[in-house]
Image: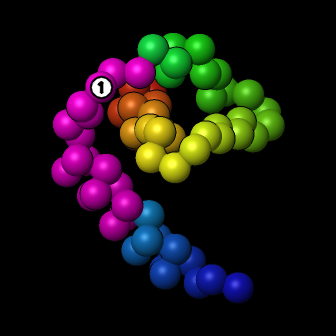
């Protein structure tokens, strides 16, 4: 089991990376259709390098 302090450090590190890379090259129209307030997980799938991580970053930045 992962310790809370280790998990906290990981989350802080990822937040720093997300905030430092807030330049998004291509705005995605799809993020307007994704409801992140659902009670269940939403799966975003696609081929390699199609923009899944960029879409996730946009969702995070949009819903701060």
57, 25: nearer the viewer: 25
Q: Does 14 lie within the magenta span?
A: yes
Kindly identify the residue that appears in the image at 49 percent across and 81 percent down: 6
Q: Looking at the image, can residue 22 be seen? A: yes
Identify the residue at horizontal 33%, vertical 21% (top origin). 27
Which of 3 and 15 lies nearest the eye of the viewer?
15
Query: Magenta region: which residues?
Result: 12-28
The answer to which image quadrant residue 33 occupies is: top right
Quarter placement of the N terminus: bottom right
For residue 14, above or below residue 24: below
- Give residue 20's position: percent from left, percent from top: 19, 51
The reply, left or right, for residue 3 in relation to residue 42 is left
Q: Does residue 21 lie above or below 59 as drawn?
A: below
For image coordinates 34% across by 67% down, the residue present is 13
Q: Position of residue 28 (x, y in %)?
A: 41, 21
**What quarter of the picture does the C terminus occupy?**
top left
> Which residue is depicted at the point 71% across and 36% down?
42
- Is residue 49 magenta-colored? no
What residue did someone put label 1 on? 26
Residue reaching furthest to the right: 40
Q: 40 or 4, which is in the foreground?
A: 40
Relative horizontal placement of residue 24, taking residue 59 as reference (left or right): left
Query: How far from the left and from the top, in percent, is residue 37?
Result: 66, 27
């Amino acid at each position: 089991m992962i310790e809370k302090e280790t998990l906290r450090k990981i989350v802080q590190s990822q937040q720093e990376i997300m905030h430092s890379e807030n330049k998004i090259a291509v705005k995605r129209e799809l993020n307007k259709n994704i409801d992140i307030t659902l009670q269940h997980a939403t799966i975003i799938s696609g081929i390699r390098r199609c923009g899944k991580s960029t879409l996730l970053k946009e969702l995070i930045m949009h819903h701060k």
